[in-house]
Image (cartoon, grey):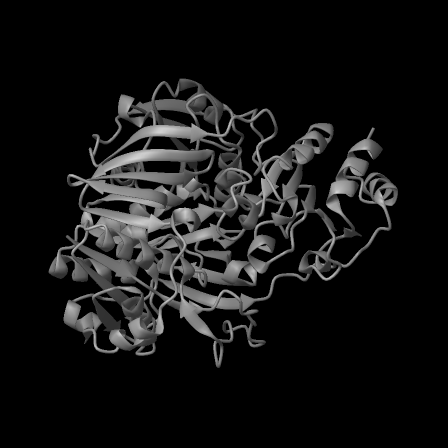
Amino acid sequence: MKILVPVKRVIDYNVKVRVKPDGSGVDTANVKMSMNPFDEIAVEEAVRMKEKGVATEIIAVSCGTVASQETLRTALALGADRAILIETDADLQPLAVAKLLKAVVDKEQPQIVILGKQAIDDDANQTGQMLAGLLGWAQTTSASKIEIANGRATVKREVDGGMETVETSLPLVITTDLRLNEPRYATLPNIMKAKKKPMETTNPAALGVDVAPRLTTLKVVEPPKRQGGGKVADVKELVAKLRGEAKVI
Amino acid sequence: MPTLILADHDNASLKPATLNAITAAQQIGGDLHVLVAGANAGPAAQAAAQVQGVAKVLHAEAAYLAAPVAENVAATIVALVKAGGYSHVLAAATGFGKSVAPRVAALLDVAQVSEIISVVSADTFVRPIYAGAAFATVQSKDAVKVITVRATGFDAAPATGGTAAIETIAAAPDTGLTKVTGQELTKLDRPELTSARIVISGGRGLGSGENFKMLEVLAEKLNAAIGASRAAVDAGYVPNDYQVGQTGKIVAPDLYIAIGISGAIQHLAGMKDSKVIVAINKDPDAPIFQIADYGLVGDLFELVPQLTAELG
């Protein structure tokens, strides 16, 4: 069974993001980039499925500039078998990405597509659900435990009030949540091996997909700054201030 | 053209976030139709009909909607939009709304605007990006706007005073793709985290699930909800639905008390709009103190019992 793992190159989660003073966006120049943490979890899960003998081939795919090759090499170093870069300089939004992924799914015919529940840059949380809709497939979002057996999936997912267990048929789109697994680190030998694994490059035109953005960003600003740093000496002062000054209790 | 709002509910009543989504819909304009899809969902439909500003409630009833799955709810919404001429489809950005809305958007071949925190006009909205480090104003030119609403960005619409008509509609057939076979829902004898006026949140500093009992005693005194940082959930101290943060619950209570929480950016994303923030931590350099209105440096194992006692 083939597993497709879409991965996204994003600003590293540790970076303190800076908003450009001209309101045009966030400063990405010379900033550390990494694989979206939820996508790392997806790659790890796919690799574990292969190690268990559930999957036979893991294909990593990324959409974006040629720099995304780095992210794909990381996926290969973590255990993916081959990679596909859908290269474009266009401003890609989730609907377009879902359409690009559908084109790859139609060609590669995986039984499972597993990806992060959201990217930590746009925080959209849409692509997996959109892809499942376009494909007419089952979807299980925010997965924290996955079992595949006899052509069916049993997935435990995080929901608002706790946990929910669902059963679905395959093929299936799964989006990952934090506690699904703890990703391994790429070892140096595997990083070296990854350089020789196949990486193919294609583009939206070749896949017949119109990636024109539907949403226009008019401006990007910093949120209002919150005054902080207030201190109290002890519990008595805290309670007095919460009652008398803040009036919240 | 009217706006369709997907109600988040448990068949017996509406989830609070639905009321905030209704306010967002009012700011967009147009008649408000609320979709209540469920099984034995009459009470929830009644509740929706009483919310001020709602023009009509559409009640879709089916046994397979008792534990609804996104595939089925999305199918019902898409059928309604294609038949009924809606310009906007809104859902509260709850786990449920977030799983359904994008599937609807893709099936309608339109974009989605996620987690709006304010409405500029019928086609322009503000939303947080980069864990709330920036606010983006985005405009959609699609014929149908699919939007999820961050509840903390809007007041709740008044739950009584409305007199909307309730119309029974057919639910889309069961897609048969996914079935819920089990649920482990946290039993709450406390206010719910996302709508509580006071939240007490514990972090890694608590050290164990057992130690969270100390927070429960405090929460009881204040009639507060209990939340947690990612670290506390990952460590197994409390269930996942307690997590406050960029990828967990977003809260904005009148009072947020962060105990043993260092204040990582990702946690702040979930609580920095709280009216008043209190931090208790033994590390004076913990980033949480930078946004706290009242910071108390010290050992939480001494301070929390003291605080509980001081409250009388």
Lateral position of residue B42 relative to residue B52, left or right? left
Q: Position of residue A155 (x, y in %)?
A: 31, 39
Q: Residue at x 49, y 35 (%)?
A: B18
- From the viewer's side, name the closer residue of B289 and B56: B289
Q: Residue at x 25, y 64 (%)?
A: A80
* Residue A135 position (above or below residue A83): above
Total numbered labels: 0
Q: Position of residue B208 (x, y in %)?
A: 60, 41
- From the viewer's side, name the closer residue of B109 and A125: A125
Rendered image quadrant of residue B265: bottom right
Q: Residue at x 19, y 45 (%)?
A: A136
Rendered image quadrant of residue B262: bottom right
- From the viewer's side, name the closer residue of A249 and A167: A167
What is the quadrant of the N terminus of chain B in the image?
A: top left
Lateral position of residue B5 relative to residue A1, left or right? right
Lateral position of residue A140 relative to residue A112, left or right? right
What is the quadrant of the C terminus of chain B in the image?
A: top right
Rendered image quadrant of residue B292: bottom right
Q: Residue furthest bottom?
A: A30
Residue B105 visible in this rendered orientation of the protein? no
Lateral position of residue B281 relative to residue A242, left or right? left
Q: Position of residue B191 (x, y in %)?
A: 61, 30
